[in-house]
Amino acid sequence: MGARDGADTDGDDGGARDGDGDGDSDGGEPVVVPERDPLLLDAMLGGLASYLRMCGYDAAYALDRGVEDDEAVRRLAAAEGRRVLTRDRDLAAATPGALLLTERDVVDQLRELREAGVRLRLAEAPARCGACNGPLEAVDPDADRPDYAPETGTLWRCRDCGRRFWKGSHWEDVRETLASL
Ligand SMILES: [Zn+2]
């Protein structure tokens, strides 16, 4: 979810009040990756980042963090207590707790994560910036509403990069994608 993805221009504020979990049941599957586990996505899994962040995960992306080779990924994960998600069998085998994915398509990867027991459900409120993984904070809706944002509903702002987010059509698209897995 980049700035423009988050910046829905359709003027639809209907999604803003829709965050009560309807239609996005996770089916009660066993959770092997606790929701609060911070994650580190390797270079091949960048497409997953915004989905996982919208589900509330602290999901760092290796290339955003300037690491790419296996050793650097392992070192960063260990330093920050992150679980590695990777499509690299060697990296997965050499990294305690790593989760190996095999699919190339991001929706297939999401399905694979769900089958592995990862809870994929939209967060009640956006907690992580889809662009940079920074923490979001709710902003004063009157004082800090950009022109391109809907006229009503809660707005969040990334503490790190300043992008604004709200629950617009992109939020609903992701909800539907997750419900279809
Ligand atoms: Zn950000």
Image (tube, rainbow, N blue to C red):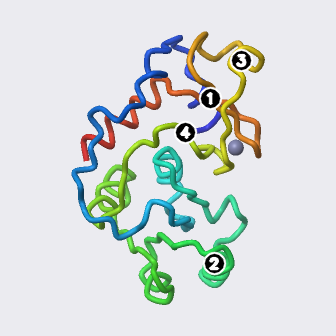
Q: Pointer 1: residues within 10 angstroms few (<14), some, or many (20+)? A: few
Q: In this view, does 90 lie above or below 177?
A: below
Which amino acid lies under the numbered mark 1 shown in the image of this protein?
Arg
Q: According to the image, label 2 marks what residue?
A: 69
Labels 2, 4: front one:
4
**Foreground pick, 154 / 65:** 154
Please provide percent x and percent y for residue 59. 56, 58
Q: Does label 3 or label 1 sit earlier along the sequence?
A: 1
Amino acid found under the numbered disc labelled 2: Asp
Q: Which numbered disc flags the more N-terminal residue, 2 or 4? A: 2
**Would you name the residue on which mark 3 appears?**
145
For the residue pair 90 and 124, the one nearer the viewer reads as: 124
State the residue at coordinates (51%, 49%).
Answer: 56
Task: Give the residue type at disc 4.
Answer: Pro
Q: Which residue is drawn at 70% across and 40% down?
A: 158
Up/down of 130 relative to 97, above or below: above
The residue identified by callout 1 is: 4
Q: Is residue 4 shown left or right of residue 179? A: right
Q: Which of the 4 quarters of the picture holds residue 99?
A: bottom left
Mark 4, secondary structure of its residue: loop
Q: Where is residue 90 in the image (x, y as percent from the top left)?
A: 46, 86
Comparing labels 2 and 1, the label whose residue is closer to the camera: 1
In percent of width and height, residue 50 lies at 52, 47
As measured in the structure, the alpha-carbon distance from the residue carrying label 4 to the one carrying label 1 is: 16 Å
Tag in front: 3 or 1: 3
